[in-house]
Amino acid sequence: MIFVSSNKHKFLEISRMMENKGITVEWKRMKYEEIQADTTEEISLDSARKLSASIGEPFFLEDTGIFLDSLGGFPGPYSSYVQSKIGNSGILRLIEGRNRSAYFLTVITYFDGRLFHQFSGKLNGTIAQSERGNLGFGYDPIFIPDGFDITLGEMELESKNRISHRSKALQALVDYLLANHGI
Ligand code: IMP
């Protein structure tokens, strides 16, 4: 299976999950333009549509966002921009004194050579009081998944994979492939 991304962490998580299912993932490492849209679904689909013309064979990609309840879901589809502009410390300042519940959403778009299919996965949690851990990437050091008292930044890849938004979306894709193509 071809996975398109410029993000090494995403590839490592995805390839490990798939390896555990006996599926090899080929990393097409490339940067592509993402539109700014109101939903993660739109961004993911638009990217896949644009790339399908040049790739010309089945592949999947994903778009992920972090949604903060007290900020009406912000940054959500703007997560990449916000991470690059204000980082985790900026998020911590923004929600000081507010409700800290949040979730991650991953939307995978799979191009089967003809049609596009989307699969999503969600992980609920809370924003930590400070950054903790240097594992993972992006918002991981400030996100504590429900049922845990450590951040994703303090979790080994295998543990993150057991619960993550990304692994749930990926499982939905695998279930679809098994049901429809036998992989
Ligand atoms: P994108 O899906 O690459 O557009 O990611 C949007 C933003 O969310 C970027 O700043 C990523 O670093 C961050 N991000 C994506 N996935 C994760 C994750 O699993 N954990 C923490 N941050 C993430």
Image (cartoon, rainbow, N blue to C red):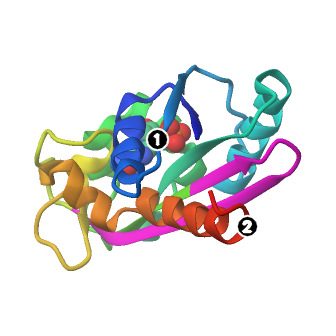
The residue positioned 77% from the left and 33% from the top of the image is 57
Q: Amino acid at mark 2?
A: Asn
Q: Residue at x 32, y 73 (%)?
A: 99
* Residue 73 in sight in this render: no
- Does the segment drawn in magenta span residue 111? yes
Position of 52 relative to 66 (above/below): above
Q: Residue at x 65, y 67 (%)?
A: 176
Q: Earlier in the sequence, mark 2 or mark 1?
A: 1
Q: Residue furthest bottom?
A: 147
Label number found at residue 180 = 2
Is residue 13 rendered magenta in the image? no
Give the extent of the magenta segment.
Answer: 107-127
Residue under numbered circle 1: 24
Q: Residue at x 31, y 58 (%)?
A: 161
**How packed is label 2: few (under 14 Cα within 10 Å), some, or many (20 or more)?**
few
Identified by mark 1, the residue type is Thr
From the image, which quarter does the N terminus lie in? top right
Crowdedness near tag 1: few (<14), some (14–19) or many (≥20) residues, C-alpha within 10 Å: some
Query: Where does residue 124 sit, x and y in percent of width and height?
Result: 37, 73
Along the viewing direction, whichever of 133 and 155 lies nearer the viewer: 155
- In the picture, measured across the screen, residue 156 lies left or right of residue 19, that is left
Residue 22: where, in percent of width, then height?
41, 52
Assign the magenta stretch its main secondary structure. strand
Find numbered disc 1 in the image and state the secondary structure of the residue it sits on: loop
Q: CA distance from mark 2 to mark 1?
A: 18 Å
- Give percent across and percent down for residue 66: 45, 55
